[in-house]
């Protein structure tokens, strides 16, 4: 005779379990994926779904304890279940209360590169036409310090911001001066090709703890095709700049982003190998954005979502194999998604936020004083569409900018919990509203999600990652490491 | 290859119009859907928006039926968990400084 009663005897008065809010979608023809209110997921067999929903599951069933511990179901006597789920949901959304963290200053549109996929840069010597002035910078800083966020990041973008480095210096020094009284956690980033780095610039960056964010598209041949400049030596200048910057600022003070062009598609492994060769510990496999010159030069339509997904999956498989062989390397977009899937934290990546990250997570102060809801918004404006130009730093107050109808309407209309299909999608906790993308491509901040390439791309990635974790225990361990990086 | 309409009939004793409409929305990239209500039956007339093979059409019609069942279960979960969902969100945002009457 057993010392313990059957599991079902522990249910109070033999009552049945109750459902907690969860959503589900088909993972493949045999399985469903379930996600709860805080984004925790589980995978079940098709036949188990009706049983769960119709409360026919027995405590003896193998998935019962799992569903209970992950907050998909609860027993009437489970007093902590609701409190715990609420705590997790609240933690996920805690970033919202801080409001805008990232402030992008476009200090010039001038650039020494002429990348065919670039959204905004200008090959111009006319400083007056495309450079931000000190007065604009001062008004921009007024906006920065109105944000209630305890952490403020100022990112300098262009064009090539080093072509207006005097203004970068001015903004850094002025921001630090103002911050002496305000005591925010202040950080600076320069988005640069590294081609114009000098010892003087590096010295300034070292003194003021400035991080450099750069671009590397792959091997020398591919990089130089994608990122042309006079002298045809973009890759060589990048490598020289990288070496100098690491020496001056520290090895981890420079990051790189890649952009996928048609030429990149057959060579994902060699692109990753180039990142490894240059000592990077991760790569962001990034598709082209539907803005600016990428549209004008027809680069954006050069490949479709399916082809990019093949590229991504091939790259991810290679990176997983590298990790299995003992080489630590991450795919950064995957890492952001895994943080949302496997932890209670939200990494605050603007493309994958709901409410959308426009304005409330990031804001752009353009060289001409225009304020935009995101980097993509100002790129859209360069195409003649100022739908997300939410004000001007000289003529509008902080309140007028942040409470503008353009911003609030876009945030409200694209809120995924009230958008058709998103509202009942199991992957909604991992996804984002992306009103600017949908407006740019479909002329509507919401768009029909079954037709959305953004939806297709991200759903395919979410399913792929869950299937990988379900079928490959070692891959799951690697992914847990990516999601829980210090 | 053809663009002929197909008709699927659902009994409203088992499926709500809400579930059927939500399923139709998920297939908006494949079919234009018209609805008709006769006796206690809901008719869905699905017209492909582009040419489709007979096998492809049959596959998607079967998927549509599965989706209607999924939507039916989603609505059931949503209704059954409404109270606890509001309770959880209420607890999550209490004392957060985000509500007007705190």
Image (cartoon, coloured by chain):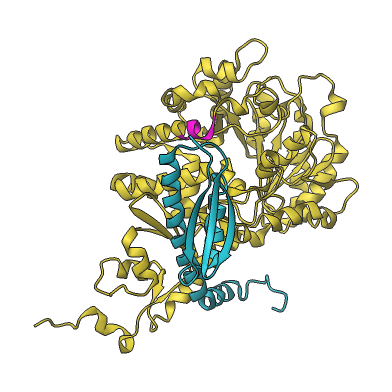
Residue drawn at x 29%, y 48% is A473
Q: Position of residue A229 (x, y in %)?
A: 66, 15
**In screen coordinates, is A280 left or right of A399?**
left
Q: Residue furthest bottom?
A: A13
Residue drawn at x 36%, y 64% is A49
Nearer to me, A38 or A297: A297
Nearer to me, A387 or A306: A306
Within the image, what quadrant is residue A253 found in?
Answer: top right
**In screen coordinates, is A106 left or right of B14?**
right
Q: Position of residue A12 (x, y in %)?
A: 33, 87
Q: Residue furthest front?
A: B39
Q: Is residue A150 magenta?
A: no
Judge whether residue A484 can be spotted in this image.
no
Residue drawn at x 61%, y 20% is A227
Name the main secondary structure of what is drawn in magenta. Answer: helix
Within the image, what quadrant is residue A55 found in?
Answer: bottom left
Q: Residue furthest right?
A: A395
User: Where's the N terminus of chain A, which quadrant?
Assistant: bottom left
Q: Position of residue A210 (x, y in %)?
A: 64, 38
Q: Which chain is cyan?
A: B
Look at the image and give the residue range highlighted in magenta.
A304-309
Within the image, what quadrant is residue A291 found in?
Answer: top right
Judge whether residue A390 can be spotted in this image.
yes
Q: Which chain is yellow?
A: A
Q: Residue furthest top?
A: A231
**From the viewer's perspective, is residue A160 above or below residue B7?**
above
Q: Position of residue A77 (x, y in %)?
A: 38, 84
């Amino acid at each position: 005779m057993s010392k313990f009663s059957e599991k079902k005897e522990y249910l109070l008065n033999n009552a049945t379990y109750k459902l907690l809010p969860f959503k589900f979608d088909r993972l493949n023809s045999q399985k469903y994926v379930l996600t709860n209110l805080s984004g925790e997921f589980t995978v079940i067999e098709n036949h188990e779904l009706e049983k769960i929903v119709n409360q026919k599951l027995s405590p003896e069933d193998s998935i019962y304890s799992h569903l209970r511990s992950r907050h998909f179901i609860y027993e009437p006597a489970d007093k902590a279940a609701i409190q715990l789920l609420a705590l997790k949901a609240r933690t996920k959304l805690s970033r919202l209360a801080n409001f805008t963290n990232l402030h992008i200053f476009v200090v010039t549109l001038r650039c020494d590169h002429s990348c065919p996929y670039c959204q905004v840069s200008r090959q111009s010597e006319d400083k007056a036409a495309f450079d931000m002035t000190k007065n604009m910078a001062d008004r921009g800083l007024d906006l920065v310090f109105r944000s209630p966020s305890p952490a403020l990041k100022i990112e300098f973008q262009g064009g090539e911001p080093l072509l207006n480095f005097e203004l970068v210096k001015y903004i850094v020094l002025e921001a630090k001066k103002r911050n002496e009284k305000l005591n925010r956690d202040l950080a600076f980033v320069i988005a640069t090709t590294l081609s114009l780095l000098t010892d003087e610039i590096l010295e300034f960056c070292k003194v003021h703890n400035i991080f450099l964010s750069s671009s590397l598209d792959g091997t020398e041949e591919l990089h130089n095709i994608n990122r042309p400049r006079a002298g045809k030596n973009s890759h060589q200048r990048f490598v020289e700049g990288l070496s100098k910057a690491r020496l001056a600022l520290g090895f981890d003070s420079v990051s790189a982003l890649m952009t996928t062009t048609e030429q990149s598609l057959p060579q994902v492994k060699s692109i990753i190998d180039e990142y490894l060769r240059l000592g990077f510990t991760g790569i962001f496999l990034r598709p082209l954005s539907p803005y600016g010159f990428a549209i004008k030069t027809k680069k954006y339509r050069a490949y479709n979502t399916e082809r990019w997904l093949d590229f991504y999956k091939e790259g991810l498989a290679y990176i997983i194999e590298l990790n299995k062989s003992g080489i630590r390397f991450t795919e950064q977009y995957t890492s952001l998604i895994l943080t949302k899937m496997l932890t209670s934290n939200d990494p605050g990546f603007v493309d994958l936020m709901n409410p959308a990250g426009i304005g409330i997570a990031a804001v752009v102060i353009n060289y001409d004083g225009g304020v935009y809801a995101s980097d993509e918004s100002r790129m859209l404006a360069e195409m003649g569409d100022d739908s997300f130009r939410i004000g001007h730093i000289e003529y509008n107050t902080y309140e007028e900018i942040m409470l503008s109808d353009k911003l609030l309407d876009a945030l409200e209309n694209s809120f995924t919990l009230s958008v058709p299909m998103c509202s009942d999608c199991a992957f909604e906790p991992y996804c984002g509203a992306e009103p600017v993308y949908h407006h740019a491509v479909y002329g509507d901040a919401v768009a029909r999600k079954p037709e959305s390439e953004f939806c297709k791309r991200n759903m395919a990635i979410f399913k792929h990652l869950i299937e990988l974790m379900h079928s490959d225990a070692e891959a799951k361990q690697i992914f847990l490491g990516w999601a829980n990086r210090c | 290859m053809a663009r002929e309409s197909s008709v699927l009939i659902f009994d409203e004793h088992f499926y709500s119009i809400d579930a059927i409409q939500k399923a139709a929305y998920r297939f908006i990239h494949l079919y234009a859907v018209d609805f008709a209500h006769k006796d206690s039956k809901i008719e869905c007339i699905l017209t492909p928006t582009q040419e489709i093979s007979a096998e492809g059409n049959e596959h998607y019609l079967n998927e549509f039926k599965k989706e209607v069942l999924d939507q039916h279960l989603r609505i059931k979960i949503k209704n059954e968990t409404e109270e606890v969902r509001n309770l959880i969100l209420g607890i999550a945002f209490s004392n957060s400084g985000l509500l007007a009457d705190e």
